[in-house]
Image (tube, coloured by chain):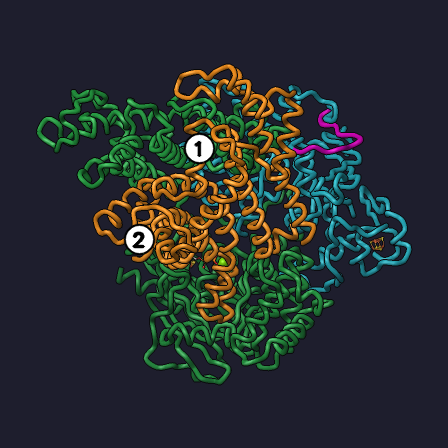
């Protein structure tokens, strides 16, 4: 078990290194002078002085290898340098905004799991039944609505037409817990529903597959209660594949959070990212993306370990 | 490859729907003469009228034109990017799978890396460097998606290349490129086309998302994402403005997903819903009153008839009656598909959902000596009986145990399901059982997982588990077919010993297609052919002196019945021609008649009954058997 | 065996590398240990053994469908160890294979016509007008109706598919066919039909067969000589009837006695223990952990194949027991 975990950890670190290298080299392979490129917002070119400044600032004047080593070293210390736009420390901005993004994601995930796993199980157990047909149809429709469309529609109905919830914005929990939660509902719901469609599909398929296995027939033949057969011999087995897929889909989820935060004016990582992209603040963009990739890899590491706990075959291999 | 005539019906609707949604935007010039980018601020947010069916947007541009031309942009970006990704990815994957080596490593690792980047973030990163625009988008999306194609192609191609028919092509000396293009590629086209649709839908989502952020398609070129972005500010005054692009976007993605779902179903019908509503269908027919009188009889199947749940299909089991006695081993033999498994599953109340019982009764004497009719029992009482009064072991020891639970847990739950017992007592009982079925070191091995055991050991575990509540009836469905001969011999011997030790007069229903095994273990034999019992009686009599031509043919065609024959000396085995009929293609009269070496014309008209012998010990379903009543042929031929 | 052998194999070895034990060293799993045999023209050599004994591996190694090592591997006078890929491809015309699973061995998307044509095309046989008569000849040869040519595999029963597989192998008129459990998946009445078909073909065409099966009676009926394998080693080889009715190796004896039979009174030789994992094989005689006659000496030397009768060899140290 320990060997398994350490092997996975090593793989995760290696993956981070590769990703860091790719992100780093993007700036090297881009045609022309990166400093000039980054400062050429809106077509106008920047002054030679500003370009030279940026070069020094980002270390672009040093040899590539030195740049690379410095970049890796700094990244490992969680020092992402300073923003091109306002020279502020990127790390501290991320530290401020990351928890807000995580809050939406965690709330959304909990909502998705609570909704989709029971629904998917019920649909999978009676595939072709009334519930399955209805739930699958709704799911197919929801799957086809991109997150930002869903968000826009939610604002339109719940905020504009019905006026039940605020259309967006953010208040710190400490300042006004009630309002904070009210503002959290729609973003979390938008992100969660999207994830729920994926989890539903996967749960249904996985349950459908598991229930056809011989061991389920053995369990029924032993005279176990139906509930127990479903729990121990169908759901428990289905859980591994479900969480693995959820883990892989988290990438898409993290991505759709960008748009959702943007729509609801939620000051998480995405506001930072979108404005950084608009202003071509490359160091900030790079830092945000590295952070997100690291989170993704971290979550998948946890999921790997979890599924090896669920399934001895992964451990024994 | 697929002609128009056998285009699957289920694909027609989704194909038309999708085609319409793709064609309409490109037919824009035929639908509207308006220019999507011509600004007319005077008419901003004008309501729909006869000339501008969908009204005008915040700059007074015609909305219909914008939706249609915007669709062109979105669809072009998505499909061009997906196609590029698909072609490059498929090439990578095929090369990786067929030639293995380093290309394999590249393919699988590359997609792992790309998967770590949320797609939209990677797109943003590139946009930062290269600036927004359709070309940038196509490039990013292609790079983003090709590893997924490579990965899918790789794993699917790997699966296909390991199949026998690809190996056969290699053995024939077909050149590699022809194997890859002619055999491997067509066989992975299904999953690839599903992935293609999925990717196209995802690409549209990302394109519109980026445009919505103002980082995708560059204004003034129209795009759905941009339209939503623009209309958002006027959501209150002008709900239509936001609904139209949203609807266009959702409808298009829905059409692709719908197409994709149906495609998946068509390619892999077993993966989805199908007809089975539940894992098991319950026994339905019932006798008026339980009728087992003889205290020695443990279970009775009477005139069982099973049909598939689809309306109007022929019976898969036509007529099966069996009496199972204490201290007796009854063997059910017959070829694949003859209905052995279904008959026994019926007795467990474990029929697959697609099969319905339409006639006959199933009765059982419980350990308490109470006689029950399975048709009267609710699900709860059936659960009480299964594993307790009847137990069952299956053919495939490799899949019959749940791979993710320890043996101990699986045995303990079988015991505690029927006996109020503490976990530690149940565990002790389980260990004792494992010792009884011949497992050395049971105390330690009870805590292993099924995958850590050999097939023979798992089958021992299954037997131990089946006997855990001392059932009166044990059903063994081909318990040794998947095992090597030496292991098979051990398991048969084990079953024999256990039967003698059990003490409460265990009755064994042993299903097999191997007459040699049956001769070893059975007291009575029932031979099945195409859903009917054709001969039944004491094992020794039937195997020595079969009365039904089918039983005779079964025994005669076994090479072990002819130790004197050798093909090298030009000898041939006495074989009968033909194959067993499908339930839907049973001949009239005797179901065996087109293979029967002694059939008479009358056999085509009369379906023989199971004629009992004078002493009642055996019965045969053949008009020419000694048991058949004299004159049955003349009598009925006249009638016919 | 007076004629020069069609196939001659000396010391065939095969190992698979599996996982890693340390960071760099790979563990290897030896599945064949120095297997030697030959097949004469027109001869049928039977291969029997339990699962994991390496039967299929031998068949695939000879056809060069998998990599293997051997001191000698000659087919029809050509050295397969040094043959060029181009020559090998044309040699494939002479050596064919029939598979166990009638469902996996045919491409579900191809009609029978396409399946058989692929075989002919691979070697440029019967082109143009000669194609159709040849196809009809082939399906008739295996006892099928020519109308089947334009159907796809899913329309056929297991026995019919197996016949198609045989027709595919026969299409290129090979002189040697590996039949890998070719009748094992078939019901007994169908199995007899296919066995008779193979017997007819060998009489008619003089093809040599390597007949792989776990069913001893089937192998005895169809073969001239039988080779018994256990965990990748040859235990006994000899004329089919002799090996079956008077086995000289304890393992063969146990196998034969374990075979369920309608007619023989069962005097089963008990084997103890399970088949060892190929990763941790017993020293000396590989069968020692289950052998009822094992002695301390059996742990020391690997018993060589010794002649015990006419063309009959057995790898057991104790010649006193059987
Ligand atoms: N779930 C099912 N749906 C529809 N038909 C079925 C189903 N299960 C079995 N059948 C059909 O019922 C018939 C009897 O099947 P059964 O499994 O009892 O045969 P069997 O004698 O046990 O064969 P085998 O030796 O292959 O196990 C066959 O024609 C089979 O195709
Ligand atoms: S009834 Fe006729 S066809 Fe049927 S088995 Fe008897 S003789 Fe043959
Ligand atoms: S050498 Fe020894 S262990 Fe091996 S088969 Fe002969 S007697 Fe048995
Ligand atoms: Mg069966």
- According to the picture, the residue beneath numbered tag 1 turns out to be B189
Dominant SS of magenta comes to: loop
Q: Write down the colour of chain A.
A: orange
Which residue lies most toward the left here? B50
Measured in 3D between alpha carbons, the distance from the residue under mark 1 to the one under mark 2, in whole angstroms, is: 28 Å
The magenta segment: C66-77
Residue at 45% of width from left, 65% of height from top?
B345
Q: In this view, does B302 lie above or below B131?
A: below
Q: Which mark is residue A133?
A: 2
Comparing C70 with A260, the one in front is A260
Q: In this view, does B562 lie to the left or right of B93?
A: right
Letter of the chain that mark 1 sits on in the rendering: B
Q: Is label 1 in a helix, a strand or a loop?
A: helix
Q: Quadrant of ligand 3?
A: bottom right
Q: In this view, does A299 lie to the left or right of C220?
A: left
Q: Write down the colour of chain B.
A: green
Comparing B115 with B345, the one in front is B115
Q: Where residue C188 appears, x then y in whole percent?
A: 54, 52
C68 magenta-colored: yes
Letter of the chain that mark 2 sits on in the rendering: A
Mark 1, Cα crowd under 10 Å, few <14 / some 14-19 / many 20+, is some
């Amino acid at each position: 078990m320990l060997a398994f975990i350490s092997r996975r950890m090593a793989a995760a670190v290696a993956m981070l290194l590769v990703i860091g290298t790719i992100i780093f080299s993007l700036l090297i392979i881009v045609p022309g002078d990166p400093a000039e490129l980054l400062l050429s917002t809106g077509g106008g070119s920047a002054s030679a002085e500003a370009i030279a400044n940026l070069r020094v600032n980002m270390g672009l004047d040093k040899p590539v290898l030195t740049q690379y080593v410095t970049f890796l070293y700094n990244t490992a210390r969680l020092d992402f340098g300073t923003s091109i736009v306002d020279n502020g420390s990127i790390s501290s901005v991320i530290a401020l905004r990351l928890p807000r993004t995580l809050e939406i994601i965690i709330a959304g995930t909990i909502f998705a799991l609570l909704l989709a796993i029971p629904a998917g199980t019920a649909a999978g157990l009676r595939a072709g039944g009334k519930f399955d047909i209805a739930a699958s149809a709704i799911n197919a429709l929801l799957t086809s609505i991109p997150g930002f469309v869903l968000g826009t529609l939610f604002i339109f109905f719940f905020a504009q037409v019905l006026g039940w919830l605020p259309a967006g914005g953010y208040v710190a929990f400490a300042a006004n817990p009630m309002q904070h939660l009210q503002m959290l509902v729609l973003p979390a719901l938008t992100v969660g529903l999207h994830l729920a469609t994926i989890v539903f599909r996967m749960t249904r398929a996985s349950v459908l597959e598991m229930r056809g296995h011989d061991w389920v027939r053995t369990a029924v033949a032993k005279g176990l209660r139906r509930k127990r057969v479903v729990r121990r011999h169908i759901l428990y087995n289905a859980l591994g594949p479900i969480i693995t897929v959820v883990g892989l889909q988290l990438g898409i989820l993290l991505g759709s959070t960008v748009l959702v935060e943007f729509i609801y004016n939620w000051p998480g990582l995405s506001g930072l990212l979108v404005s950084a992209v608009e202003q071509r603040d490359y160091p900030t963009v790079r830092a945000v993306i590295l952070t997100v990739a690291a989170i993704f890899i971290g979550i998948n590491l946890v999921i790997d370990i979890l599924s090896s706990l669920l399934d001895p075959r992964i451990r024994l291999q | 490859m697929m002609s128009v005539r056998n285009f699957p019906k289920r694909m027609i609707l989704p194909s038309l729907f999708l085609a319409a949604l793709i064609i309409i935007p490109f037919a824009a010039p035929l639908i509207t003469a308006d220019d999507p980018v011509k600004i007319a601020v005077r008419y901003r947010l004008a309501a729909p009228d006869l000339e501008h069916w969908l009204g005008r947007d915040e700059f007074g541009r015609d909305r219909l034109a914008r939706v249609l031309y915007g669709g062109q942009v979105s669809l072009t970006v998505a499909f061009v990017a997906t196609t590029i990704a698909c072609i490059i990815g498929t090439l990578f994957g095929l090369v990786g799978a067929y030639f293995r080596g380093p290309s394999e490593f590249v393919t699988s690792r590359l997609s792992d890396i790309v998967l770590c980047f949320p797609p939209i973030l990677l797109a943003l990163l590139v946009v930062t460097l290269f600036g927004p625009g359709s070309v940038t988008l196509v490039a990013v999306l292609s790079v983003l998606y090709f590893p997924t194609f490579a990965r899918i192609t790789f794993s699917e191609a790997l699966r296909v290349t390991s199949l026998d028919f690809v190996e056969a092509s290699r053995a024939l000396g077909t050149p590699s490129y022809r194997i890859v293009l002619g055999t491997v590629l067509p066989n992975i086209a299904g999953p690839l086309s599903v992935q293609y649709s999925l990717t196209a839908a995802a690409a549209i989502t990302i394109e519109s998302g980026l445009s919505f952020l103002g980082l995708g398609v560059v204004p003034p070129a129209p795009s759905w994402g941009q339209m939503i972005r623009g209309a958002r500010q006027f959501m209150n005054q002008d709900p239509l403005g936001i609904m139209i692009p949203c609807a266009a976007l959702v409808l298009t993605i829905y059409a692709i997903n719908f197409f994709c779902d149906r495609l998946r179903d068509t390619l892999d019908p077993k993966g989805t819903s199908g007809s089975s509503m539940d894992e098991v269908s319950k026994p339905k027919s019932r006798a008026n009153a339980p009728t087992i009188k003889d205290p020695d009889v443990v279970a009775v199947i009477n005139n069982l008839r099973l049909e598939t749940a689809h309306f109007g299909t022929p019976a898969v089991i036509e007529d099966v009656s069996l009496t199972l006695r204490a201290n007796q081993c009854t063997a059910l033999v017959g070829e694949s598909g003859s209905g052995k498994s279904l008959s026994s599953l019926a007795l467990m109340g474990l029929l697959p959902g697609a099969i319905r019982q339409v006639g006959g009764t199933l009765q059982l004497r419980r350990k308490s000596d109470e006689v029950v009719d399975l048709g009267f029992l609710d699900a709860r009482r059936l659960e009480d009986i299964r594993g307790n009064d009847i137990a069952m072991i299956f053919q495939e020891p490799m899949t019959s145990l749940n791979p993710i639970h320890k043996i101990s847990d699986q045995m303990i739950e079988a015991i505690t399901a029927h006996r109020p017992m503490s976990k530690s007592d149940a565990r002790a009982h389980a260990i004792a059982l494992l010792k009884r079925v011949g497992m050395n070191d049971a105390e330690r091995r009870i805590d292993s997982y099924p995958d850590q055991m050999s097939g023979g050991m798992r089958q021992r575990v299954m037997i131990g588990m089946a006997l855990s509540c001392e059932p009166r009836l044990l059903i063994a469905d081909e318990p040794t077919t998947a095992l090597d001969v030496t292991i098979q011999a051990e398991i048969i011997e084990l079953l024999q010993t256990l039967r003698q030790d059990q003490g409460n007069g265990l009755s064994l229903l042993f299903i097999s297609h191997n007459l040699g095994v049956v001769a070893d273990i059975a007291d009575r034999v029932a031979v099945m052919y195409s859903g009917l019992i054709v001969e039944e009686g004491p094992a020794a009599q039937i195997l020595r002196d079969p009365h039904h031509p089918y039983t005779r043919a079964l025994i005669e065609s076994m090479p072990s019945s002819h130790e004197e024959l050798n093909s090298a000396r030009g000898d041939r085995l006495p074989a009968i021609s033909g194959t067993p009929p499908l339930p839907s293609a049973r001949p009239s009269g005797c179901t065996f008649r087109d293979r029967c070496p002694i059939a008479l014309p009358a056999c085509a008209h009369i379906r023989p009954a199971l004629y009992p012998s004078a002493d009642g010990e055996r019965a045969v379903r053949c008009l020419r058997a000694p048991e058949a009543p004299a004159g049955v042929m003349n009598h009925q031929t006249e009638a016919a | 065996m007076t004629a020069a052998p069609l196939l001659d194999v000396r010391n065939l070895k095969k190992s698979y590398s599996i996982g890693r034990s340390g960071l760099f060293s790979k563990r290897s799993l030896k599945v064949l240990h120095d297997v030697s045999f030959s097949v004469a023209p027109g001869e049928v050599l039977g291969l029997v053994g339990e699962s994991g004994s390496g039967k299929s591996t031998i068949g695939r190694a000879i056809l060069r469908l998998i990599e293997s090592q051997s001191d000698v591997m000659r087919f029809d006078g050509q050295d397969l160890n040094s043959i060029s890929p181009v020559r090998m491809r044309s040699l494939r015309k002479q050596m064919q294979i029939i598979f166990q699973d009638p469902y996996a061995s045919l491409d579900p998307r191809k009609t029978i016509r396409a399946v058989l044509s692929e075989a002919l095309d691979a070697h440029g046989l019967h082109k143009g007008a000669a194609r159709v008569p040849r196809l009809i000849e082939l399906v008739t040869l295996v006892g099928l109706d020519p109308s089947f040519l334009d159907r796809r595999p899913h329309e056929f029963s297991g026995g019919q598919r197996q016949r198609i597989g045989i027709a595919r192998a026969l299409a290129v008129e090979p002189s040697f066919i590996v039949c890998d459990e070719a009748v094992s998946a078939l019901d007994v009445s169908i199995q007899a039909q296919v066995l008779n078909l193979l017997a007819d073909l060998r009489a008619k065409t003089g093809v040599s067969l390597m007949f792989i099966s776990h069913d001893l009676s089937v192998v005895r009926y169809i073969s001239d000589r039988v080779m018994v394998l256990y965990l990748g080693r040859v235990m006994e080889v000899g004329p089919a009837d002799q090996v079956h009715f008077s086995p000289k190796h304890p393992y063969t004896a146990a196998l034969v006695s374990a075979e369920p039979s309608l007619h023989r009174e069962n005097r089963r030789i008990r084997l103890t223990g399970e088949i060892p994992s190929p990763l941790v094989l017993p020293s000396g005689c590989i069968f020692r952990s289950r052998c009822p006659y094992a002695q301390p000496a059996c742990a020391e030397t690997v018993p060589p194949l010794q002649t015990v009768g006419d063309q009959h060899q057995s790898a057991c140290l104790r010649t006193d027991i059987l």
